[in-house]
Amino acid sequence: MEIKISIKNLEAFYGKNRVLKSVSLDIPKNKVVAIIGPSGCGKSTFIRCLNRMHEVVGGSMTGSILLDGEDVTKVDPVLLRKRMGMVFQKPNPFPTMSIFNNVAAGLKLNGLRNNKKLQPIVEKCLKQAALWEEVKNNLDDAGMNLSGGQQQRLCIARALAVDPEVLLMDEPASALDPISTTKIEDLIFELKKNYTIVIVTHNMQQASRVSDYTAFFYVGDLIEYSETRKMFTSPDKQQTEDYIRGRFG
Amino acid sequence: MLEHFEEELENLKTNLIKMASLVDDQVNRVVTALETDNLELCKGVKAKDLEVDAYDNLVQTQCENILALFHPVAVDLRYIMSALMINNQLERCGDIAVNIGQRVKKAGSYKDLIFESQIVEMGRTAKEMLRNSIDSFIHSNSELARKVIDTDEVVDKFNKNIFKFLVSKMQTNPELIEPCAHLIVLIRHMERLADHATNIAEDLIFYTDARIITHQKKLANREKEGD
C-alpha cells in the first residue's frame, strides 16, 4: 500500500500547552482516514498540522510530516495548502462572489483569469462535488444564496479546483441535514478514487460509513489506529471500545 | 440515551432467558419421560412450544428495534447478533423437544430396548449440553461454552453406536422394526438437539471473544484435503 502522508512523533502546542503527544501514523494514498475522539482530544489540531494551518492559528509543532516523502515544513505553506485542500465544519463560500467565482477563486489567484479556460475547470469541479446539476443555470448567483448543504459542496468544489492531492475535512457534515450529509458522504466515497481524504468527525456512524481507516484520539494521544471495519467490530483497546460504544467522551 | 440502551439490552436478555428456560423445561420433560416411561410429562410440551414461538418473534423484534434505533457497535453489536442467532437455535430446540415427545409416546414402552441401546444416556448428555449452553449464555462463560462444544463428539458417538445397535435389532428381531424405527428418528432428534446446543455455545463465543468458530473443524479438514 502506497503511503501518502507519513507522520512521526508529531507534537503540537498552543504556547506551552501540548495538545498532541508523539503521534505517529501513516495515511495511505486514495483512502479515507477518519479521525475520531471526544472534544479537545486534538482531532482538528492534527489535521491542521498536516497542511500547517496550525501555525496560522498561533500554534507550533515538532516531529515530522512527510507528504510523498517530502518534509512539509520545507514546502512553501501556500503551495502545501494547494496540495492539501481543506473543508471546514461551517460552509464558508466567499460572501461577495458568485458560484462560478467561488470555484474559480483559487485558480484566479494563481494567475488563470481567462473565463473560457476557467469554464471547463469550474464545470468539472462542480460535477465532482455533485453540485453541477443543481447550479448549472445559476452560476452567476451568489454562493451565499445556496442552501447549507449546497454551500458545503461548493466549498468542496472550490478546494478541488486547485487540483489538490489530499482533502482535509473538519466535520464537513456536522452542520448539515441528513440528505445533505448523505450527499457529502457519497461524494467522499467518489472522491477517494482520486484523492486521499482525512476527515474529522464526531459522528461514529459517519466514520464507520465513509472511512477505510480510523484513528481514535484521546487527550492528545493516538490511542488506536486500524482498519475501520476492525475498529467498529473488535477494537484492540478498551478505551476505544468504551468510546465507540458511547461509554465516555 | 445510554441508560435507555442498557434497559433495552436488559429486556432482551430477560426475554431470551425466559425463552431458554421454557425450552430447557420442554427438553427436560421429554428426556425424563423417556427415562421414567412417565408419558404424562410429554403433555404440555407442544403448548409450551407456542410460548417459545411467541418469544422467538418478540426477541427478533427487540433485536430489530435495537439495531435500528441505537446502532450498536463492537461488543454490543456482537451481543445483538448472538442474541438473534441463539434465539433461532432455541426455537429449533423447542420444535425438536416436541418431536422427541411424539417419538417417546410411540416407543417409550419398549423399556428393555431403550435401556440396552443407551438412548437415555444420550438424551441426558444432549439435555446437559443444552442446559450448559444456556448457562454459558446467561453468565457469558466462554469456558463452559467450550465444554459444550467438546461434548458434541460424545453425542455423535452415541448416535453412531445406537444406530448400529437398533439396525442390528431390526435385522434379528423383525417384530421390533417399528419401535426401532421410532427410536432411530428419536436419536436423530437428540443429535440435532446437541448440534443446536453446540451452535449456541459457538454464538456465545462469538459474543465474548469476537471470534467466529462455527464450521471451523469442517473448513480446516477441507483445507487439509485441498493440500
Image (cartoon, coloured by chain):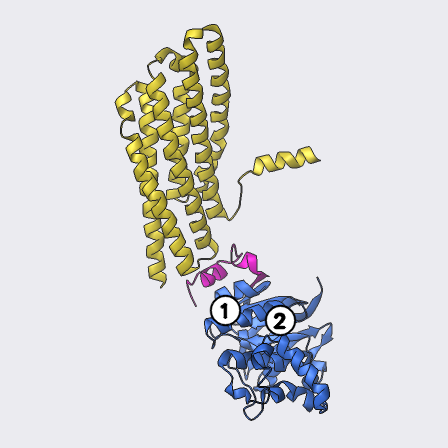
Q: Are marks 2 and 1 in contact (CB under 8 Å)?
A: no
Residue B191 is labelled as none
- Helix, strand or loop at label 1? It is loop
Residue B226, x across and y down, in percent? 69, 35
Looking at the rendering, the stretch of residues picked out in magenta corresponds to A224-249
Q: Amino acid at mark 1?
A: Gly
* Residue B74 vs residue A10, the one in the foreground: B74
Q: Residue at x 36, y 45 (%)?
A: B57
Q: What is the chain identity of the residue bearing mark 2?
A: A
In the rendered image, the vertical position of residue B90 relative to residue B163, given as above or below: below
Which image quadrant: the N terminus of chain A? bottom right
Q: Colour of chain A?
A: blue
Residue at 28% in and 21% down: B39
Quarter residue A199 falls in = bottom right
> Is A241 inside the magenta-drawn segment?
yes
Is residue B100 shown to the viewer in this render? yes
> Quarter of the image holding residue A168?
bottom right
For the question of whether residue A81 can be seen, the reply is no
* Label 2 CA crowd tier, 10 Å (few <14, some 14–19, many 20+): many
Give the chain coloured yellow: B
Which circle's residue, 2 or 1, is located before the other in the chain?
1
Q: Chain of mark 1?
A: A
Residue B153: x %, y % from top left: 50, 28
The disc placed on residue A197 is 2
Q: Which mark is residue A37?
A: 1
Question: Image quadrant of residue A78?
Answer: bottom right
Q: In what quadrant of the picture does the C terminus of chain A appear?
A: bottom left
